[in-house]
Image (spheres, rainbow, N blue to C red):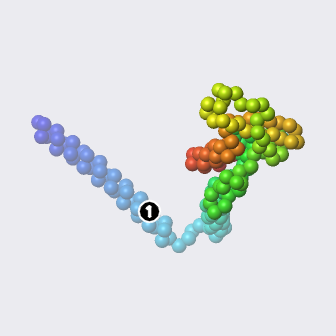
Amino acid sequence: MIAWAISGAALITGSYFAGWWHDIAQEFQFLISVLFASSLTPNWVLGILSLLSLCALVIFGLVIYSALFKSNVEGPESYTSDEFFELFWEWDWGHGDIYNQTIVALCPRCKTRLEALPPSEPLQLAEMIGYGGSSRVRMLCTNCLFEKQFPGTLDRLVEEVKKQIERKIRTGEHKRK
Ligand SMILES: [Zn+2]
């Protein structure tokens, strides 16, 4: 009885797939006949179709070109300014690197180059033994009198800015500016 059922099922499945293959063969024959048929399509339809495919090719080319061009523009060497520690900073690239001497602090209000001056008041003892060491730098705008003080020296501050620039390039954040 079970064997009978299995063979019955096999027969049904087999005929099912046979029908399926027959359909596929028919589709294939149809495709071949369409491909090799001399054109029954009016020429203007063919003309429009070829124009459309030409347009598609041109658009595809433009997309590829703009993608390449954009990635070139957004390379790290086009990243030459940003805001760090509430100041505006600009720098130049040379041979794929940023040199500390080219990193310049600008006033966040008026974009004047800031002067690095000694602190206006003497250091407290707590500051001398703290993180900033025994110095502090006062960044002053001679145009609008904006000023901000930082622990350590100007070299130290510039080094911190360079670290932030490197970090943003590493994470790709510089592209979002
Ligand atoms: Zn200013």
| Secondary element at image label 1 | helix
Residue at which label 1 appears: 30
**Observer-nearest of 64 and 118:** 118
Q: In this view, does 46 lie to the left or right of 108?
A: left
x then y, percent, for residue 131 = 61, 33
Q: Quadrant of the C terminus?
A: top right
* Furthest-bottom residue in this view: 38
Say which quarter of the image contains residue 129: top right
Say which quarter of the image contains residue 118: top right
Does the beta carbon of the residue at mark 1 sit less than 8 Å from ligand 1?
Answer: no
Q: How many labels does the image show?
A: 1
Say which quarter of the image contains residue 146: top right
Q: Can residue 161 be spotted in the picture?
A: no
x then y, percent, for residue 27 = 41, 59
Q: Residues within 10 Å of mark 1 (few under 14, many from 20)?
A: few
- Residue at 48% x, 71% y: name it: 36
x then y, percent, for residue 33 = 45, 67
- Residue at 88% x, 42% y: name it: 143
Q: In which quarter of the image is the N terminus?
A: top left
- Residue at 21% x, 42% y: name it: 9
x then y, percent, for residue 65 = 64, 62
- Residue at 65% x, 43% y: name it: 156
Q: Amino acid under label 1?
A: Phe
**Observer-nearest of 70 and 49:** 70
Q: Can residue 147 be spotted in the picture?
A: yes
From what the image shows, is residue 118 above or below residue 170?
above
